[in-house]
Image: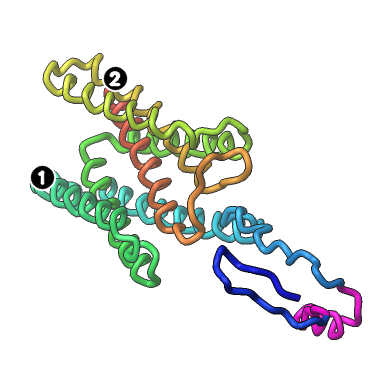
Amino acid sequence: MSYQVGKGNVAVVTPPGTYTDMFNSEGTTAAGGNQQCGQAPPDYSCGLEDSSFSDAALRRDFIRKVYLTLMIQLLVTVGFICAFLYWDTLRKWTWTNTWFSYAMLAAVIVLIVAMSCCDNLRRQVPLNFIALGLFTIAEGLMLGSIAVYFDAEAVLWAVGATALVSFALSVFAMQSKWDFTAANGSLWVFAWTLFSFALLCAILRSQYLYIMYACLGTLLFSLYLVFDTQLILGGKHRKYELSPEEYVFAALNLYLDIVSLFLLLLQLIGLCR
């Protein structure tokens, strides 16, 4: 059999014979003859489009790590606050050394930026736990140094209100099908608007504006707590979700939301008293 290729005088001659698919024939023989030659290859793309949370056990393990880490952080923070409130020597020392609060605030900001920007710092064990531990200690010292300027009763009321609000919002985020993860841009705009309002409050120095700022801030960080909780939970009703490797970063987000709620509720209770 011969046929001409192109316009030239080149011809391709094929000797007579039958075509045999050696690969498929060997596979058919090995499989006992159950496969047919020319069968389409299997589809290996099935399941690749699933998220990293496709395994329910992996998701439960991730959530367990996040909330266990968060509980340890909160217990350490409450311990520092109680030490500053009920240890008279430490309380008086904090009153006379106001630089301590600003130093702890600077340390907290540096650690937050480092853990947010450096992936290896928050993913590599045990470096991530060391960084998170240092951050928790610095945050606890800062909150304790702030709490000494309020009555112990007001601080305890703020702790109780924060625990109640955080628990209620976490349950709501777990049960609700409203997707707050898609509202990231709106929350960001709300945060910058609240920051501008804080500058206005600093200029006018009105108690009513302070109360309004505390109320709006409580609303903002309540929404952020629901947002971060749904990022952790993931699922089919969520647009975005966190990677299972980001359990330290997830605990950090929830911790910052709860701490911000505590500070705003403490300010609100102090102003109303």
Residue hosting label 1: 98
Q: Residue at x 20, y 54 (%)?
A: 110
Q: Residue at x 69, y 70 (%)?
A: 3
Looking at the rendered image, the quarter that the C terminus falls into is top left
Question: Is residue 20 on the magenta stretch?
Answer: yes
Q: Is residue 153 above or below residue 89?
A: above
Is residue 89 in sight in this rendering?
Answer: no
- Magenta segment, which residues? 18-35
Q: Position of residue 101 (x, y in %)?
A: 16, 47
Disc 1 packing (10 Å; few <14; some 14–19; many ≥20): few
In terms of depth relative to the viewer, which is nearer, 208 or 203? 203
Is 207 placed left or right of 132 in the picture?
Answer: left
Q: Position of residue 60 (x, y in %)?
A: 61, 56
Q: Secondary structure at mark 1?
A: loop
Q: Position of residue 246 (x, y in %)?
A: 44, 57
Q: CA distance from mark 1 to mark 2?
A: 25 Å
Q: Residue at x 13, y 44 (%)?
A: 95
- As drawn, the residue found furthest toward the front would be 9
In terms of depth relative to the viewer, which is nearer, 139 or 146? 139
Q: Are marks 1 and 2 in contact (CB under 8 Å)?
A: no
What amino acid is labelled 1 in the image?
Thr
Q: Residue at x 14, y 23 (%)?
A: 202
In terms of depth relative to the viewer, which is nearer, 104 or 106? 106
Q: Which mark is residue 211?
A: 2
Q: Secondary structure at mark 2?
A: helix
Is 4 placed left or right of 28 in the picture?
Answer: left
Is residue 213 in sight in this rendering?
Answer: yes
Q: Is residue 175 above or below residue 115?
A: above
Q: Earlier in the sequence, mark 1 or mark 2?
A: 1
Q: Is residue 215 above or below residue 52?
A: above
What amino acid is labelled 2 in the image?
Ile
Q: Position of residue 154 (x, y in %)?
A: 33, 32
